[in-house]
Amino acid sequence: MVGNSETNELNVEALYKRYHRQVYALAWSILKDQDEALDAVHDAFVKVMRSAERFEGRSTTFSWLYRIVVNVCIDRRRKKYRSHEQPLDEATERRSSAPPTSAFEPNAAFEANLLRSALDAGIRGLSEQHRTVIVMRELQGMTYEQIAEGIECPKGTVMSRLFHARRKLRRALGETIELSPELAASAA
């Protein structure tokens, strides 16, 4: 991306067109708030525009962009926690993000909501490092190599963090809810 500012603007625009949906999904999965995620994506692309001339190509542009988005999201979460902002109604937020079911099955819907709530709580209880790798791997479907490049650490570290994050989530799920045999098998 080295070159004059007109070339960089064009490349940043191309990056936006190509990746904005993926980085929004990443931001939303970390922040769990549509407005916050949109703001984070905006902030990330502003940072990309400002630093496009300094991009040296040591990593792929995709990994570089993801790292910027993750950092912006982490910064936004830290600021939010420092200012003690809390969502008005987390239960309403969870219900609104629940997938619609074709047939109403009260037990299955109850267990699915219970599992979703326990997973959300478990993910929120992880450290930033563990939360970042679990979101990138399990929600974004990134490879170990992409995650390692995106968070600038060795692949082995990514694998270790994922192992510990998954173990902590399993413990949190086991302590929080008792699932039907079908859901327990899928959560393990």
Image: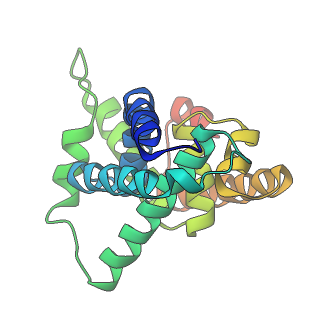
Residue at the location (42% across, 29% down)? 14
| Rendered image quadrant of residue 136 | top right
The answer to whether residue 10 shows anywhere in this view is yes
Image spot of residue 157 (x, y percent)? 80, 58
**Left or right: 73, with 128 as reference point:** left
Residue at 22% over, 59% down: 90
- Left/right placement of residue 97 relative to residue 20 reads left
Q: Horizontally, is 38 left or right of 78 in the view?
A: left
x and y, in percent, of residue 108 in the image: 34, 30
Q: Quadrant of residue 131?
A: bottom right
Is the N terminus in the top left, top right, bottom left or bottom right quadrant? top right
Q: Image quadrant for the C terminus?
A: top right
Residue 78 in the image: above or below residue 126: below
Q: Is residue 6 above or below residue 52?
A: above
Identified at 66% across, 52% down, the residue is: 166
Observer-nearest residue: 100 or 1?
1
Residue furthest front as drawn: 4
**Would you place residue 149 above or below residue 143 in this image?**
below
Q: Quick one: which residue is furthest to the right in this view?
A: 156
Whether 113 is drawn above or below 182: the answer is below
Nearer to me, 184 or 157: 157
Residue 128 image point, x, y percent: 55, 67
Looking at the image, residue 32 sits to the left or right of residue 188; the answer is left
Q: Decide if residue 137 is in sight here.
A: no
Counting from the top left corner in percent of width and height, residue 161 is at 73, 58
Name the colouring of the figure. rainbow
